[in-house]
Image: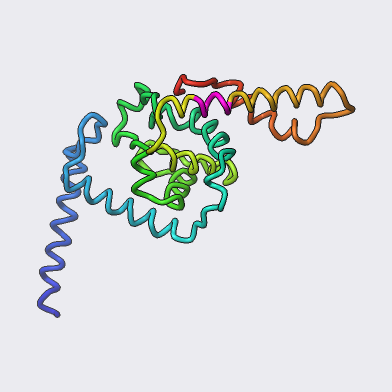
Amino acid sequence: MSKLWPLVTSAGLVTVVGTGLVVGTGAFDVSASTPHWDVTTKFLRMVRDRSIAVRSAEVIPPGNLEDRSQLVEGVVHFQSHCAVCHGAPGVEPSEIAQGMYPPPPDLGRTAVERGPAEVFWIVKNGIKMSGMPAWGGHGDERLWPVVALTSKLPSMNAAAYAELVAEANRAGEGHHSHSHTAETSGPGPSAHGDAHRGHNHTHAHGRKAGNGT
């Protein structure tokens, strides 16, 4: 064992000196227009995938992900926050997404490759140095519907997605109407109207169907 220490020490010194040279000379290109080396890409994907698998292992998906109401609610968040980078059926990713590296993935393919638990963990926590933000501040109850929607993307065409967005818009307008009626017909706002007012103004009212932003 003692004979190995010189080799281990030498290897460590070479690694430290090599890393110092790469950093000090600026040899590593951090430009988003230059892809990683293949070995770097493979290493980063391995680290990412293992990290997600370990941390999502105890996530338990709810039993209502197949409900239509979950898809309608999920598309509101998706259209406002996700489609701009990931695109959607019939909606191309924005110019911003096309200039990102690594490029935002096709979430239909991601839903096939990963289960609901992993997709939820990613949506909630984000991924460092990838452009994927953490949406945990929005609350689990608003993130699971997004997971429900992504699970349907592989089999959803543009017409079906557009109809889902339109259905969400109609539901949002109905909540607005209910809220305004409750405010004018009684001594104070109803609990239903108060709970939905901020949500609808941000999503259903502020972002309408089909613009992908």
Pick whichever, 88 or 129, lies toward us.
88
Q: Is residue 104 left or right of residue 65?
A: left
> Which residue is at 37% across, 55% downward?
51
Q: Position of residue 15 (x, y in %)?
A: 16, 56
Give residue 165's position: percent from left, percent from top.
Answer: 52, 26
* Residue at the image point whose x is 43% and y is 57% from the top: 55
Residue 186 lies in quadrant: top right
The magenta region covers 163-168
**Direction from residue 159 to residue 65 in the image, left or right:** right
User: Most extreme residue toward the bottom, as rendered?
Assistant: 1
Identity of the residue furthest to the right in this view? 187
Q: Within the image, what quadrant is residue 170 found in?
A: top right
Apparent side of residue 179 relative to residue 134 in the rendered image (left or right): right
- Seen from the viewer's position, the closer of residues 177 and 45 is 177
Tell whether position 105 is magenta. no
| Residue 151 picture quarter | top left
At 75% from the left and 30% from the top, the residue drawn is 193
Query: Which sits in the foreground, 75 or 15?
Result: 75
Identify the coloring: rainbow
Above or below: residue 182 compared with residue 20: above
Chief SS of the magenta region: helix
Q: Residue at point 48% right, 61% down?
A: 58
The image position of residue 20, as x and y in percent, is 19, 48
Q: Is residue 141 above or below residue 88?
A: below
Residue 27 horizontal/vertical position (percent):
16, 38
Front in this rendered view, residue 17 or 173 = 173
| Quadrant in which the N terminus appears | bottom left
Count how many numbered circles sit on residues in the image.
0
108 in relation to 181, above or below: below
